[in-house]
Amino acid sequence: MIGVPTDDGDELPRAYVVKRPGTELTEAEVYDWVAGKLARYKRLDGGVVFLEAVPKNASGKIQKKTLREWAAEEKVKAKL
């Protein structure tokens, strides 16, 4: 999960999810599951993005910098 910038200078949480083969999972299902577990300000209002694989470095750490760059390129419009 990372924070994606909005037009007004705030950040909204966004989840990057890798689906297991043969499973059907929707953005709404992920959003609803997280909304039931976390506080309101932590809900995934920045969206849910499905990936083939999460970018990792040689030691296996998730490259959040790469995810933030991808989000900046998309010019995310917040769902409010």
Image: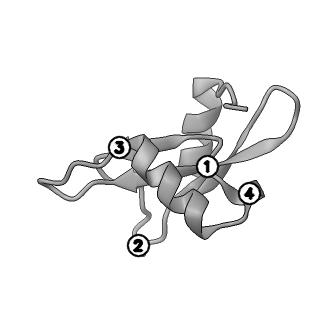
Q: Is residue 44 left or right of residue 80?
A: left
Mark 1 in CB contact with mark 2 (< 8 angstroms):
no
Q: How crowded is mark 4: few (under 14 residues within 10 Å), some or many (20 or more)?
A: few
Q: Is mark 3 on a helix, strand or loop?
A: loop
User: Tell me, what colour scheme is on the image?
Assistant: one colour
Pick the quarter of the image with the C terminus.
Answer: top right
Q: Residue 23 carries which label?
A: none
Query: Element at badge 2?
Result: loop
Q: Position of residue 65 (x, y in %)?
A: 61, 51
Location of mark 4 (residue): 40
Instruction: Pick whichever of labels 4 and 3 is earlier in the sequence.
Output: 3
Q: Earlier in the sequence, mark 1 or mark 2?
A: 1
In-image side of 70 versus 4 (left or right): left
Q: Which amino acid does label 1 sit on?
A: Leu
Instruction: Name the residue tied to disc 2.
Output: 60
**Label 4 – label 1 distance at C-alpha:** 9 Å
Quick one: label 2 or label 4, which is nearer the N terminus?
A: 4
Q: Hey, which residue is sitting farthest bottom in the picture?
A: 59
Q: Are marks 4 and 3 in contact (CB under 8 Å)?
A: no
Tell me: residue 7, above or below residue 47. Answer: above
Q: Distance between the residues labelled 1 and 2?
A: 25 Å
- Mark 1 sits on what residue? 44
Q: Of residues 41 and 1, which is closer to you in this image?
A: 41
Where does residue 6 sit, x and y in percent of width and height? 77, 32
The amino acid pointed to by label 4 is Arg
**Residue 26 circle label:** 3
Of marks 1 and 3, which one's residue comes earlier in the chain? 3
Q: How crowded is the residue under tag 1: few (<14 C-alpha within 10 Å), some, or many (20+)? A: many
The picture places residue 30, in percent across and down from the top left corner, at 44, 53
Secondary element at tag 1: loop
